[in-house]
Image (cartoon, rainbow, N blue to C red):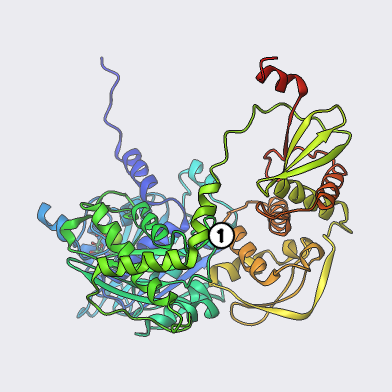
Amino acid sequence: MGLIRVLPPEVVSQIAAGEVVERPASVIKELIENSLDAGARNISVRLEEAGKKMIQVCDDGCGMDPDDAVACFQRHATSKIRTPDDLIRIRTLGFRGEALPSIAAVSRMELLTRAHGKDEGVKVIVEGGAVRDVQPAGCPVGTTVTVRNLFFNTPARLKFLRSTGSEMNQILATLIRIPLAFPSVSLVAFQGDRELFRHSATDDLKSVLIPALGRDIAAQMLWVDYYSQPYRVRGFLSPLSVTRPTRSHQWFFVNNRYVRSKALSTALSHAYDGLIREDRHPLAIVYLDLPCDLVDVNVHPAKLEVRFSREQEVQSVLVEAIRSVLVSALTPVASPLQVVTPEPTPSPSRELAQFRALLRARFGRGSEQTSQEAVPPPPRRLATPKPARLTAIAQWSASYILAEGAGGELFIVSQHRAHEKYLYDLMVRKMQDKEVPRQELIVPLHLELGQLQSHFVRCHLSTLKRAGFVLDPFGGSSFLVRSIPTILARLDYEKLVTDLIDEISFGGTATAEDLFGEILATVACRAAIRAGEPLSRAEMQRLLDDLLTVDNPSLCPHGQPVMIAITREELDRRFER
Ligand code: ADP
Ligand code: MG
């Protein structure tokens, strides 16, 4: 008797569901995509407990007749493709016929739908994938899908769901993307009575940027519209003065489908190479249109990834397109506030040559700096117990302090990490009633955030306050920053606060305590002296003295080494003495 058995259908469908339905946000994504494919003009979403308890998506699309309303729960049942050839000319968001059966397999689902031209609708109840009841029902034309108790029959999955706040972050990130691709469809979302998100149909592409980027940044984005047979690149790009510490503000749409694409994000980075700091990222919304046979959308169960048949060509078109706009933005006449629309048929090579010349003229020294960063491999690291004393000898490469220890060892101390560690420790030591000392701003700082960030801030106001940031909601997604941690007071804190919120809101930190630690670490990192800043001997000594007041000076708040020590013996050995 062999050991291999064909799995029973329930197991098969739960395995398959695992690929499509990861969390409430993925259910919402699939249901909204179905509504869009059904030609809906209005879509509304209702949630309870960030979708963990209930998700309802209601649309005014074409609806389904009673047969289809039952058939749609079968695996690989779809109205969108029929033959293998159809797979290479997919114009709809869905085509795999997997979403509804997958969601139904791991929840209690109700489908209420009425087809266009029919007098009556139908209600279908499905539990754990099995159709329990089908009844005629009165309802408007369109479809309402209600998903309750997601993962009720898959406890392992249920355990993986994060806190309500964190699931909500993912949901908002999903909602924000929809109007970027479908501006003419209205989309609203509520949690209980509270409105989470609202987009009213518009044909003004620029206004759809506001939920994603906030009003201020949206107004500064540059428009690109570039055509290079058979590709078309359109979108919005941040001017060089606006960057982010993460790639969280980059959205790519291929033939109007949101995708995560390494190929495209690499090309985007390339286009900004040398123009912005290496550790920063541009903001971008990029729409790439190309013939369907040059892109395979059937490579990922949730259809979030695509494969280009001529990937390098796509990348170079994207780089050209973006550079053409950056070139115009670099020229003195164009202020970053201006929308720059290049001619539809620019000559890429001339454009590129012009761009390189501009780069050289403007950033001649910048490129040298980057090559300097190729630091020689570090000497072998030894365990570094806290030294009793450190005497500054010299600064090396404007980034490291060379110092002598009490026992004559040579210490190499990263000036940035040393300062970072000291500031972190200082904030913790000076805490009063578990709160970091803060300084009130004489003029509160007005912050206009994207929806996702503003949701995050609203959820974590008390943790932010403990860390020194007092923010007051100021209507919509605006906030007034009333105070900041004292150690930031002398810095350019406006940029710092937006960066910080950006970094932490995409970190997905689980507990308030973790988040608190992360905020302190980020603040310390931002406030600390950077690598590349020249220091006087006195400044170096001061920094070393400060560093030795902390408990564990050899590791920075992120757990990386602050200093390394080389003993006399080690050096002698290397000189073969
Ligand atoms: P796919 O979208 O890949 O076809 P789904 O499982 O998501 O697979 O949906 C199965 C079918 O159910 C769709 O092809 C469509 O015919 C129908 N359907 C699903 N949702 C809706 C809706 N909101 N309005 C109209 N028809 C729908
Ligand atoms: Mg679908």
Residue 175 in the image: state x and y as whole percent.
44, 68
- Judging depth in this view, the residue of 540 and 269 nearest the camera is 540
Q: How many residues crowd mark 1 within 10 Å: few (<14), some (14–19), many (20+)?
A: some
Closer-to-camera residue (360/319): 360
- Relative to residue 352, is residue 479 drawn left or right? right
Find residue 489 and report its image quarter: bottom right
**Residue 286, placed above or below residue 405:** below
**Which of 450/539 is in front?**
539
Helix, strand or loop at disc 1? Answer: loop
Q: Residue at x 48, y 61 (%)?
A: 364
The answer to whether residue 283 is above or below residue 376 is below
Q: Position of residue 484 (x, y in %)?
A: 77, 68
Classify residue 518 as left or right of residue 355.
right
Disc 1 residue lies near ligand 2 with CB under 8 A: no
Question: Which quadrant: the C terminus?
Answer: top right
Q: Position of residue 250 (x, y in %)?
A: 44, 63
Q: Residue at x 71, y 54 (%)?
A: 534
- Residue 297 seen by the camera: no
Residue 483 lies, with reference to residue 161, above or below; the image says below
Give residue 243's position: percent from left, percent from top.
Answer: 53, 66
Residue nearer the viewer, 175 or 207:
207
Name the residue carrying label 1: 245
Give me the residue at 71% from left, 47% from top.
417
Indicate the amino acid at tag 1.
Pro
Quarter of the image containing the N terminus? top left
Q: Which image quarter: residue 389?
A: top right
Ligand 1 quadrant? bottom left
> Which residue is rendered at x = 76% and y = 24% of the image?
567
Q: Is residue 366 visible?
A: yes
